């Protein structure tokens, strides 16, 4: 009687990482034209196969309740025709970006005649761990390949069918375009131990990027033996200043909170200057109520909006990813800044004001990856910033901050040209 072969997880992970390292060596010198051809072909295949993608996605949606996913998480999981088209457009926009590899960032000529060029190069191999959002699969593949990096994709089990279908199309595009066979690989096992195996391979993997819940990101940050680009939470604020246009304030607050509940750049906290609170609080409570948003407020706000719930200390630092927002009245701009820097997550914060001095003070003092003036927090996004797509939004300060596009996945080397110089 034949005995089934035991799956060797460690061997599988090591071989996957080794293949990625080999592919990265080819990618580093691949022409920009080949990468463009790949990205455009991948976009064509996504559009042409939207029905098969929907069929694969339907399996994940059907299984989602069994994984305990919230409504917001299930929303992130959906591959609607609009999402598939957005994926294709993202690939095309990345293709249209200038070729980053080989760019001379700085150039100097020394007194001895040496020409010193600071030149952009790929990082090498990226291990990308993410949850729930299969559209991120295409974004990550596009950004990594365009920046000359091989990528190992490890999506969540809740999106396994969708991710497999997307990567199958990406592999077809790679084969047709002359890309290295293992430039983009999807981890096919859903075993959580695979993540730990990859995180212990700094000899093959140059960078780990976790994108998902705080638990996932903390695990990666603690276990990784290579650098990590991360953000733990997205507790984003909108501050309505004393000099705010209240029509703009209402529009921006509603969009920041309600346009999509389950994203890291959704507003979770609202601060309002006392000078406009009496007029603005009932107005914004009504507007948010129309979207079924629960209000958790300080005592002064509840005196103006009696139906609101009382906020706790915990609420000021929460990333809800749900129809809930915390609200507080502040006496000054400086109090708003202190509150944001204490409770915020250094992700995205906005000020609504007609006072340029206040805007400048806010943008200088608030320590976040993106600071908005009279605009929605939802704009902190690689696509909206013109990066084509993003592999994540970093709240780190080193090596990258904010939306991470192709340039954030590169490093540099010094290339020096001489004609026989020696050091005396």
Image: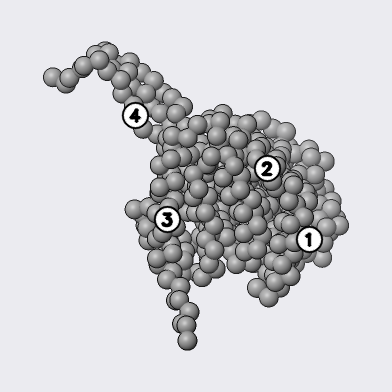
Neighbourhood count class around disc 1 (C-alpha, 10 Å): few under 14, some 14–19, many 20 upward: some
Residue furthest to the left in view is 424
Circle 2 SS class:
helix
Q: Name the image quarter holding residue 105.
A: top left
From the viewer's side, name the closer residue of 23 and 172.
172
Residue 17, numbered circle: 3
* Marks 3 and 1, how far apart at CA: 45 Å
Which label sits in the foreground, 2 or 1? 2
For marks 3 and 2, give the CA distance: 26 Å
In x, y percent, where is residue 3?
46, 82
Left or right relative to 120: residue 254: right
Task: Give neighbour class at mark 4: few <14, some 14-19, many 20+ (Cα, 10 Å).
Answer: some
Residue 387 seen in the current view: no
Q: Is residue 68 above or below residue 82?
A: below
Q: To which residue does mark 1 refer?
A: 293
Query: In the orientation shown, which residue stands out farthest toward the front?
Result: 1
């Amino acid at each position: 009687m034949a005995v089934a072969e035991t799956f060797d997880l460690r061997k599988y992970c090591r071989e996957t990482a080794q293949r990625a390292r080999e592919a990265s060596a080819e990618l580093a010198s691949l022409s920009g034209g080949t990468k463009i051809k790949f990205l455009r072909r991948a976009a064509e295949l996504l559009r042409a196969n939207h029905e098969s993608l929907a069929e694969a996605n339907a399996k994940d949606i059907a299984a989602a309740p069994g994984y305990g996913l919230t409504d917001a998480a299930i929303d992130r999981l959906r591959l609607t025709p609009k999402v598939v088209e957005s994926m294709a457009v993202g690939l095309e926009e990345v293709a249209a970006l200038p070729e980053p590899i080989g760019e001379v960032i700085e150039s100097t000529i020394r007194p001895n005649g040496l020409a010193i060029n600071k030149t952009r190069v790929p990082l090498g191999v990226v291990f990308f761990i993410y949850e729930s959002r299969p559209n991120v699969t295409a974004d990550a593949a596009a950004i990594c390949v365009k920046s000359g990096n091989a990528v190992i994709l490890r999506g969540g089990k809740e999106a396994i069918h969708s991710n497999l279908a997307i990567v199958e199309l990406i592999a077809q595009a790679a084969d047709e375009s002359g890309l290295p066979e293992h430039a983009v690989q999807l981890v096919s096992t859903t075993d959580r131990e695979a993540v730990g195996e990859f995180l212990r391979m700094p000899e093959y993997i140059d960078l780990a990027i976790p994108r998902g819940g705080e638990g996932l990101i903390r695990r990666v940050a603690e276990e990784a033996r290579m650098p990590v680009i991360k953000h733990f939470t997205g507790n984003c604020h909108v501050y309505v200043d004393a000099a705010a246009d209240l029509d703009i304030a209402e529009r921006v607050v509603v969009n920041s909170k309600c346009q999509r509940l389950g994203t890291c750049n959704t507003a979770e906290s609202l601060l309002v200057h006392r000078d406009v609170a009496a007029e603005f609080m009932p107005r914004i409570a009504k507007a948010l109520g129309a979207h079924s948003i629960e209000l958790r407020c300080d005592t002064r706000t509840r005196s103006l909006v009696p139906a609101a719930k009382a906020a706790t200390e915990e609420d000021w630092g929460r990333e809800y990813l749900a129809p809930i927002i915390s609200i507080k009245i502040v006496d000054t701009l400086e109090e708003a800044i202190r509150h944001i820097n204490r409770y915020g997550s250094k992700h995205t914060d906005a000020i609504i004001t007609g006072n340029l001095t206040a805007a400048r003070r806010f943008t200088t003092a608030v320590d976040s990856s993106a600071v908005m003036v009279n605009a929605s927090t939802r704009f902190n996004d690689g696509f909206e910033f013109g990066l084509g797509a993003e592999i994540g939004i970093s709240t780190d300060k080193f090596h990258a901050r904010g939306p991470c596009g192709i340039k954030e996945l590169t490093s540099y080397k010094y290339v020096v040209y001489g004609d026989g110089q020696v050091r005396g």
